[in-house]
Image: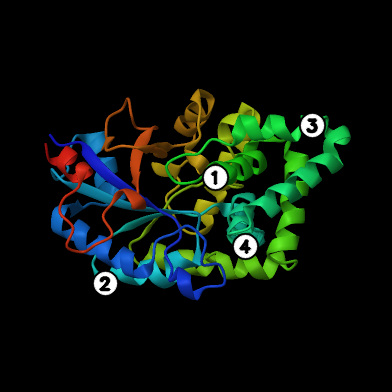
Amino acid sequence: MFRKLTAVMYHYVRELPYTRYPAIKGLLTSQFKEQLFYLKKHYTFVTVEDCLDNLENGTSLPANACLLTFDDGYIDHFVTVFPLLEENSIQGCFFPPAKAIITHEVLDVNKIHFILAAADGNMDQLVSGIYDCLDKYRSQYQLQSNSHYYAKLAIANRFDPAEIIFVKRLLQVELDENVRKLITNELFRQYVTEDEKAFAKELYMDLDQIRCMARNGMYIGSHGFDHQWLSRLSPEKQEVEINESIQFLRSVHSPTGNWVMSYPYGDYNDSLIEILKKKGCSLAFTSKVDIAHLCNENAYALARLDANDLPKLANAEPNLWTKKLLD
């Protein structure tokens, strides 16, 4: 019985050179089309329901099963992705964060994306501005030295250089939430816009668009309420996040029994998994890079490939992941 699944994770899909923020890290629409061509050639697309049936009833998946997932609820997913999936009879699994959709607030993670995009080519100035903010709030929030934070956090990964990782980790998780928000909001107003609500309405889908996708066969899952690092929350706050996200699923007419989650930042812990089980979640995706194996032991820690792990040329030969899956 085949239980391997290539789940691919997407975020922004847009014609970046023709937008106000071409430095945003995402996939061009043309590249997404090429990847669909490649995946149709080398894989068999499955649905979330196929995956749940495999886990619960032991039905077999195709030997080269593939599921497409889309995090963060961007307008790209309705305007660009949804028509292409529908045209190709492919189900997408979409994970919008509830708060951004309901309240028209820009999530901190996205504020940081657009601050970085606006500062593209001038990172020294941005880092200097962050140092100024740390200096301003140092005594009030008992902050460490600027050099301490940079040495601790500025560690390059496969996607970003050290100074970008420094900005992301400092403003996403390192600082106390209150000062984090103060600095992020100050930089967002300086680099991006003072009209957050208008920006949010341009950036994210709305409820009607999400309901439209659900009516037309797309799967809508949970991405939490406020896109937080969930392992950093107490179990009580984790449960509040999950309860609010379930209410959101109900509002867009998505399943609230036997449902699926994508962890914001890929972040989770044992207490969160216990809450998910209690609340009827059956599968949860991380951002760990690998082929997923559908079994009870892995059901709440499923790996995915990033879109950047796939070839961006339509005539590309099967890559490492295709070969690994078919071995």
| On screen, residue 302 above or below 205 | above
Residue identifier under label 1: 224
Q: Is residue 20 above or below residue 289?
A: below
SS at mark 3 in the image = loop
Given the image, on which type of amino acid does mark 1 rest? Gly
**Left/right of residue 24 with respect to residue 70 in the rendered view:** right
The amino acid marked with disc number 2 is: Glu
* Labels 2 and 1 touching (C-beta < 8 A): no
Residue 6 is situated, as x and y percent measured from the top left of the image, at 26, 44
- The residue to which callout 3 is attached is 143
Image coloring type: rainbow
Residue 289 found in image quarter? top left
Q: Earlier in the sequence, mark 4 or mark 3?
A: 4
Quadrant housing the C terminus: top left
Q: Residues within 10 Å of mark 4 (few under 14, many from 20)?
A: many
Residue 124 on image: x %, y %: 66, 51
Distance between the Cα atoms at labels 4 and 2? 34 Å
Query: Given the image, on which type of amino acid does mark 4 rest?
Result: Ala
Q: CA distance from mark 3 to mark 1?
A: 29 Å
Q: How far is disc 4 from disc 3 in space, using C-alphas? A: 26 Å
Question: Callout 3, which amino acid?
Answer: Leu
The residue that disc 4 covers is 118
Q: CA distance from mark 2 to mark 3?
A: 52 Å
